[in-house]
Structure formats: C-alpha cells, structure tokens
Image: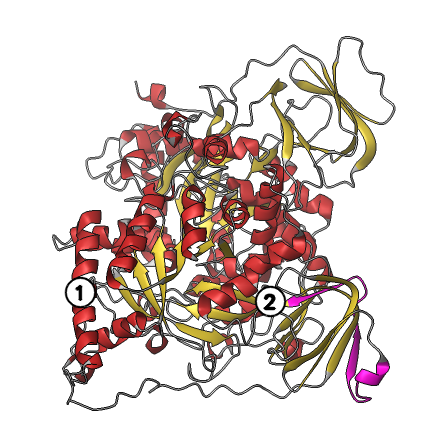
Amino acid sequence: MVRKCALLAVTLALGACAANKEAPKTASTKPAEKVAAVNKDPYPSTYKAYPGQSTVITNVTIYDGEGGRIENGSVFFSDGKITSIGGAMGDSNIPADAITIDGTGKWVTPGIIDVHSHLGDYPSPGVEANSDGNEVTGPVKAEVWAEHSVWPQDPGFSRALANGGVTTLQILPGSANLFGGRSVVIKNVAARTVQGMKFPGAPYGLKMACGENPKRVYGGRNQMPSTRMGNMAVNRSTWAKAVEYKRKLDKGENPARDLAMETLVGVLNGDILVHNHCYRADEMAQVIDMSHEFGYKVSTFHHAVESYKIADLLAKEGICSAMWADWWGFKMESYDAINENIPLVHAAGACAIVHSDDANGIQHLNQEAAKALADGRRAGIAISDEVAWTWLAINPAKALGIDKKTGSLKVGKMADLVLWNGNPLSVYTRPDKVWIDGAMMYDAFDPKKRPVSDFELGQPGEGDVK
Amino acid sequence: MRHLLLVCSALIATPASAQTIAITGGTVAVGDGSVPIENATVIIRDGRIASVGNNLTIPADAQRIDAKGKWVTPGLFAGFSRLGLSEVEAVEQTNDTIARRSSFSVGIDTADAINPRAKAIAVSRANGITRAVVAPAGGNSIFGGQGVVIDTGDDLNPITKTQALQYVEFGEAGSASAGGSRAASFTYFRNAIAEALDFRRGRERDDLFLKRPDLAALLPVIDGKVPLMVMVDSAVDIHRMLKLKAEFPTIRMILGGVSEGWEVANEIAAAKVPVVVNPMNDLPDRFEALSATQSNAGRMAKAGVSVSFGQIGDFDTLQIRLLPQYAGNMVALNKVPGATAMSWGQALASITSHPAEMMGLGGELGSLKVGRRGDVVLWDGDPLELSSAPVAVWIDGVRQPLGTRQDRLRERYKRPNEGDLPKAYDR
C-alpha cells in the first residue's frame, strides 16, 4: 500500500520507496567562502498569529496540560495569550466585547503537540514525486533540513487540526539515515510557505536513527553501515569530526563552512535537540553512552518501544520517550512492544509522550493516550486522566524546547487550545473548536472554518467533512 | 482427471464444548444492528447460542457467569485481514501474505499458510476478535488467490471456511500487477475467465496464461459459488467494476477498499454488492482516493449498502484489534455537523453480523441469535469505548485463554531494575 512508503520507518517497503538516484549536486554541497559570522536563522519564521477575538469558555472541564484539572471552570484568552484560568470567573475580569462560549458537558485542553510527524515531507498523495523525507544518498546527511522538503499543501495538516486537535507538530526527516537532518517545528496553520508555519523561536531538532533502517538501507547496497556496530562506528566517527570542528570554532578559527558540522556543533552547544529514532532498550543505552562520550544530550527517543525495559535509566538521564500506544510486531525491533509502555515509562518518573509518525494516527492521538492509560490501569498503574494529558501537552513541549511558550494552559502562554465536544479520552469525542495563538482555526459548526489545501481545490470531496 | 481439481468451499465443523454456560445480567448487544438489551442473559449450550433475553430460566447444570455491569457481544468478525499470515511483518521468512515470485495465482490457497500460533492471533483473541476474513495479496497477478475465514481459538485448527473468497486487485494496484495500465487488468481478468471456461470444456491449449490450479479455482468463482473480493477504491473504478459484474452476472462480488464508495453509494446498493472498508481512511493518499472521508461508511450504509469493517492496508496482519475503535469513531461522527455517522448498533454490526453475512455465514456467526455458534465476548464496558477490554471470550462455546506474550514482558519489566538475579530468571 502506498501509505507504507510514508511510514518508511516501519516496513520493508523502505527499499522500494527510497530512490536510488544520486541527488544532483547543488551549490550548497560545496564548501562556501570563509565567513566570520554564520546566519543561524537564514529561513526565518514569517508566521504571525491570525486575528482572534477575546474569548471566555465557561462551565467547562479543563485539563491544563501539566496534570491539573478544573471542574466547572473558565478559561479566558485574549491577544493570542491565555489571560486567566480557574473556577467560575468574575465578570469584572472579562471585557464586555469578549465572546462567551458555554462549555457545559465539554472539555478544554491545550492543543495537542505531535513530536513525530512526516506531514509535508511524506505528504498525501503519497506519490514518488512527493516523497521527500529521506535523503537516502548517504547515511550521514546532517546537512539537510526537513523544512526544505515540507509541502505546505499536504491535505494531512487539516485532518490533524480538525479531527486531532493538533496545534503544533515537529516534522522530521525519515529514519533511513543515521543522521537524518534537521527537523522543523511548525504551528498547524495553513500557509503558502513553510516559513509561514514555522513556530517562532522553536529550537531546531536533529533526527538520528538507530537499528534496522540505516543498516538495511546501506547494507543492502554493500555500504557501511550494514550492522549495528557499523551504525555506531559511523556515528562516532561523525561526532569526532564535529567535536574537532567545534574546537576550531571555539579557538576562533574560521574553518570552511560545513553545513553538516554546523548542525552537529549546534547539538554539541545545546542549541539543537536530538530526536533519536530507536526501538530497542540495549541500543538506547548505547546511544546514551555515545552522548556522554561526545558531550551532547538526547532530548527524546522516538518509537522507543522498549523504553519500559530501561525506564529507570531514562528517568535518570532525563530523556523523553515518544511512543505509540499499541503498534507492534511490524519489524524485528518492534517485536517486544507492549501496550503498557507509555504508562510504565511515566510510572518510573521518566518523560512519556504519545506520538504518531502517521498521517492517520495524528488525527486521534487523544484516543491513543486513552488506550495506553486504560491498559496501564488494568495493569495496576494508577494515573489520572488529567495527568495522562501531559503525554500530549507539556511533555512534548519540553521535548521540543517550547514549553515556556505553549503546551499548557497557563497565564501568558500561547492560546493554543481545543474545545472538545465531550470527554477527550472517549472514542465518541471530537474537537468542536481549535484555536492557535487565540485565533479560531477550526470550528465544527462552520464549514468556512475548515481549511482546504490547494491540492484539494476543484477535486472530488473539496470542503467535505473528513 | 480434470474434474478432480474442482474445488468448492467448505464450512469446517468445529468440536464444540458440551458445557452449558449462562452469562447473566449484562448489557447484551446482539450484533444485528439493534439497540443493546439491558440486564439480559445469554445461554450457550453445546457450543451454540441457546437463548438470549430477559428473565430466562437458567438450566440447573449451567456454569453461571455474572455479567452485571458488563457488556456481552458476539465475537467480533474482521471483514478483512491478513491475520495469521505473518509473525513479524518485515521478517520475510515469517511473512506469507504475498507470493511475489510464485508462478501460481488464483489457485494459491491461504488455508495452507495460516499460522494459528502467530502472536497476532492471540492478541486479536484477547481483544475480542473471534473470526476473521483472511485474504492473500496479489503478487505477480491481479489475483492473489483463495482467502479463508478463520477463528482465533487457541488450537491448531484455525480454518472456519476454506475457499471463502477469491482475491483480485483492480485500480492502481491491479494496474501495476497487470503490467502498467488499468486496461491491462481488465484484459487479464477477461482472459482468465475465458481460459477457465475453455479448461472446463476440455479444450487443450498451449498458450495459457494461467496454470491448472488457477483455472480450477476460478471456475467456482465464475459460477458464483466462491465470492470474488475486488479491491478497488475510486468512484470511477467502482462504477466500472459494477459494469463488469453485469458482464459476468453469475459472479458474486464483494468490494474491498472502496475509499470513494460514498460517491456511488446508490449504485453499489442497487447492485446488492456488500463492501468492506477501513472506515478511518480519510486522506487523499492516492489519486484513487481523492474524496476519502470518514463519512464514507455512514453514507454507504444510509444508501442501503451492507458495510463491513476490516483492517485494510498497513498492519493487516497485526492490528485487527483496532476494529472496535474504528466502529466507535463512526458513532462519534453523530456529534460532528455535516458528517454521516452510524448508530451504535450499525457500527457494531459492521464488525459482527455484516462481515458474517458478507461471507455467507450469517446463519452461523456474527450475532447472538439462537442457533448461532457460541462466539461470545464479555467486556468490562462499552465494547466500542477505548477504555474497555474483554474479560472472557468463548469460541464455539469454548472459553479461551486471553494471555499474550506481551503480558509476560509487561510482568517481567513492571519494575525495570534488576534484583538478585538478572531479568532472564524472572518469569
């Protein structure tokens, strides 16, 4: 099936999807002139919040995204920010022109944050011409940036918004390479350009990958790496070069520009966050030692289906795990995936995140959290609904380095929120309305508040409910 | 003797439990689309449903199961899967879903490949799936071969019905295996039928495309004894399939995939062709699925089409257990303006009675009606809700074990740190 290509990380189809053609050489692959100062933000965000109206939602159940719950509460937001939140709100605090929405029987949560998406770089339709997620021309491609692949017209963004309540997402390169390249964090707002979606001030991420995918892709071509020890050797050689490049920079030397090294030095300096695709517990432990060897920190292990086996180690290291609720068995390294992975990681005091890696899955991350929570409870792990919501809110925000700005309903933070038409951990619940920076970007009751990508214009089903 | 090659589908009798079981006081959903019955009792005797309703007299010898506060449904029936055809999808040696390099096609019989010990069967059983349609995939041909219906019981005899269907791909997939155009897939199909009819008449030819087992397996399809499951997605391709059905009126057709079915729902209903869909498919992920929407299933059902749900696409060997979640999502659409939802009963029927009827097994399976086989699931809550899970599963009246390998891993690592001995000693 076509979708298997988009998943890429997970199936044998990788070989079939991955083009064997050499990428054409471009100016950016050549060493550039020596320059004293490198522009660290050459593709800056042009996103600006859309106009919103001061709004208060009353009589509503609130999960604040940091584990707090308010029954029969109110949340007030204006100028794109959360202005106040609490119990029944005195009218004196609310301007007369504010819109009031009665939230009786409904829930408000922070907008969902997905730390692992390929919307835009493996978009729909999943045709070869749109397949831009893996630069499979070499195992070390730290120089590529996902934002240069993301197609803002991917129809998947609107489904993630309307069905999923997703307001922020990280688009990652695929996992064919050990060093996959830089990620980009975006607001789930339709725009003509990727720059128009970029989350202002969000740090970059670096995608790395363990295990089966890199060794299969390159081993299949009789190239290094073809084994897990080959993976580690190429990783370590690359980090050693990066440490040397950084040493030159720190000494005030001006080495020739090297885009890959600039990204890796960004990691070594703590400016760029490592997002490491890794399934097996033993491999995660190897990566942790490697990060100590070269002096960097892993923000998050992605997929991490065996995190439950080393949850104590992950807690000690302060590394998040971004996980599925119940994906398993599609490849050897996912054979030991269990449904209680997320709650077990959480219970060990480590940072747990529900992620999608899938254009359908991103539409029901709330449901995935609900399944994991229920399976955990059945195994005797007591976690409340509102605490489980941290897996979709503040924890992914921390993993992306944007937790001071979004990821919870705290005064002064971005008004990224979802009004759900019932308990958001029920299968029978969907978003009623979604706001991003205080602007209503989706309203189930208003067909005009339903984004339709250029690709869908003039096609069957244009503007339909999806 | 050529006629010895002829095959016909067979329903396999299963040794059933002689025990009488009374599941009392639960919320009972019959599976036929009706509203659940509160405080009802289900009695299973000799492996079949003996009675269902309120205020039943419980036989003295019955084993009583208290279902107060719980729900009772028929065993769930997956309308499409590749369950039992792989252990680890990407480990080729364990994956029997597709015979890419085989010279055979129509004649390939999935029954010969089902592994009842595939972990996904135990996982499916633990999640309330008791029966599943299992189809092969197309390899060198638009035809994938003969599918089966299996049960998920903890034994070495998984087959409920052999030669349950013939699997064929049209649309983009069929085009690719036929050599690169939709037109070629039609030529391939018509030629296959012509060759099979020649074969029946005893005409010897030396330029045959298909091999003897393929031709033999195609004859009962032409005769309508074995249904033809046609995988097709776009409205245009569906429309064209219904024309093909008119061209070969004896063929009994099932449409699978059907992402744009809602656009031609009336036509499908008029042709009385049942469909099996993945109802969550709402992305224009292919040019043949441009109008995909979660309202597809509801709109077809509203038009009078018999709609079943299946795990079509990714994870078709693994994640059959997601069907109740899909069904629940169809009910969720009731609260989405402009969407076409299903009632709770309809949604449950799409994973119980409808797939059973689609496979010609409606009198045997898929509902808690008297005389049906004793496939029963006792749930700790609303079976379509995310927080619910089975607490007991019976297949043909036999209580099934619900443990999985994953449960063992969970128990071993409930506390990840090692004790006085390594984890390997902890079991």
Give yes or no for residue A51 being in the magenta stretch: no
Span highlighted in magenta in the image:
A91-109
Which comes before the other along the chain, label 1 or label 2? 2
**Pointer 2 local density, CA inside 10 Å: few below 14, some 14–19, many at least 20:** many
Count of residue discs = 2
Look at mark 1 in the image and give the residue it sits on: A240
Where is residue A291? Give x, y as percent: 29, 59
Dividing the picture into quarters, in which one does residue A204 lie?
bottom left
Does the segment drawn in magenta span residue A100? yes
Which x, y percent locates residue B399? 61, 20
Which amino acid, by three-letter code, is at mark 1?
Ala
Residue furthest toward the right? B55
**Residue A460 appears in the picture as rendered:** no
Q: Name the front one of labels 1 and 2.
A: 1
Would you say residue A188 is visible in this rendering?
yes
* Residue under label 2: A165
Subunit that carries the residue with mark 2 = A
